[in-house]
Amino acid sequence: MMGYAVKIVADPKAILQAWIPFKQLMGVTSVRTQEDYAQARATIEALLDEVGDNENHPLMDVLDYLADQAKAYEDEHFVIPDAPPREVLRFLMEQHGLKQDSLSDCAPQSRISDILNGKRSISKEIAKRLARRFHVRVDLFL
């Protein structure tokens, strides 16, 4: 730990006292089962609605933590196909039970429809939004 200042570490009992109510409020804090995954995805969606594009929002740390938990589960249980970007999008929408209008935070429904039907490619900006939404690499959509 050379060169780093260590803050005072909280007492484990105090952490536990804060953790239990947090865990009860969240409904899920680790993703080990399909049920945990479904709960995590629903919570992530609610947090995304609240946080929006505000990277400094106080809930961003909670969103990142839960998204990391969901991603670890996805990495173990879902294999993203090596396919054209529109097929990757279609696959992820199916995996998450989403319809075109569910992605209005990424692009208008008509644009998503055009992408899925092969009439439009995915722009860099939409690719970034989709990657953030699905917690995957941007290059999957480009």
Image (cartoon, rainbow, N blue to C red):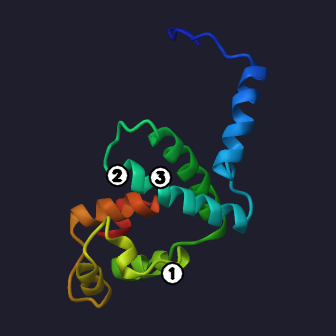
Which residue is found at the position 53% from the left and 42% from the top? 62
Q: How far apart in space, not on screen, are marks 2 and 1 (Cα)?
A: 23 Å
Residue assigned mark 1: 94
Q: Position of residue 119 (x, y in %)?
A: 21, 89
1 or 3: tag closer to the N-terminus: 3
Residue 47 in sight in this render: yes
Which residue is found at the position 51% from the left and 11% from the top? 4
> Crowdedness of circle 1 by 10 Å Cα count: few (<14), some, many (20+)?
few
Residue assigned mark 3: 47
Residue 9 is drawn in which quadrant? top right
User: Looking at the picture, which amino acid does disc 3 mark?
Assistant: Leu
Q: Is residue 46 left or right of residue 51?
A: right
Q: Quadrant of the C terminus?
A: bottom left
Q: Position of residue 98 (x, y in %)?
A: 47, 77
Q: Secondary structure at mark 2?
A: loop
Dots 1, 3 in contact, CB < 8 A: no
User: Looking at the picture, which amino acid does disc 1 mark?
Assistant: Glu
Q: Secondary structure at mark 3?
A: helix
Residue assigned mark 2: 52
Q: Is residue 138 left or right of residue 16?
A: left
Which residue is found at the position 49% from the left and 39% from the top? 61
Q: Nearer the viewer, residue 40 or 93?
A: 40
